[in-house]
Amino acid sequence: MKITDIRTIVVGNPWKNWVFVIVETSEGIAGLGEATGGLQTMPNKEAVEEIKHLAIGRNPLEISNIVDELYKAVMLKITPAISAIEIACWDILGQYLKVPIYQLLGGKVRDKIKVYANGWYSGERSPENFAEKAKFLSNKGYQALKFDPFGSEHLRLNKESEIFIKNIIRSVR
């Protein structure tokens, strides 16, 4: 089996983009990885484009060798791109062996995990709006919410903005 192509797909949403990487093989198996890293959509997408020639033609089942060569060949540490290709190769290996990836990585650790809501805050940045949206998510069963109470306030932190931010946090509790 050989890697025949590596493609990127950018999926956008209102607060950031996700960069997905698809590694295709000569056997028709495609692996999925992710190269999202903060607000660096284009640099991460282009980093994958820059290094993909080093993995094309290689056996995707030789994951450690591919990752080692990518790290050695690239002077810049473009870890989201390298990690995405690695994750996609693990996905290919799991599909090839017909086992979930967690088995390849040592076995299942737990049967379920707690999740949190992220990216749920939009609209007016007021304590009332945050409280309303937090209540909606709580009613949907979420017990934890990740959010940024600062918004652009971090650019001008003062006593007034500190009070405002504390009020947002109190409203979500």
Image: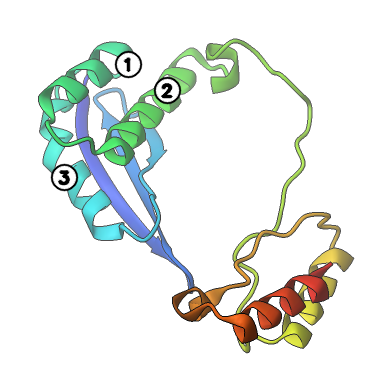
Q: Residue at x 85, y 73 (%)?
A: 135
> Mark 2: which secondary structure?
helix
Tag 3: residue type? Answer: Glu
Q: Which of 109 and 167 is in front in this view?
A: 167
* Residue 136 visible (yes or no): no
Q: Quadrant of residue 73?
A: top left
Q: In this view, does 112 lie to the left or right of 95?
A: right
Tags 1 and 2 in contact by the CB under 8 Å rule? yes
The kind of residue tagged 1 is Ile
Q: Nearer the viewer, residue 7 or 153?
A: 153
At 30% from the left edge and 58% from the top edge, which residue is drawn? Answer: 41
Locate residue 124 relative to residue 17 in the image: left or right. right
Reply above or below: 160 against 68.
Answer: below
- Whether the residues at callouts 3 and 1 have beta carbons within 8 Å, the answer is no
Which image quadrant is residue 54 in? top left
What is the CA distance from the residue labelled 1 to the residue labelled 2? Answer: 7 Å
For the residue labelled by badge 3, is the local secondary structure a helix, a strand or a loop? helix
**What residue do we see at 26% from left, 50% from top?**
44
Q: Name the residue under label 3.
A: 49
The residues tagged by marks 3 and 1 sit, at their Cα atoms, a distance apart of: 19 Å
Mark 3 vs 1, N-terminal side: 3
Name above or below for residue 160 compared with residue 144: below
Q: Height in image: 53 above or below 139? A: above
- Under tag 1, what secondary structure? helix
Badge 1 is on which residue?
A: 63
Residue position marked by numbered label 2 in the rendering: 90
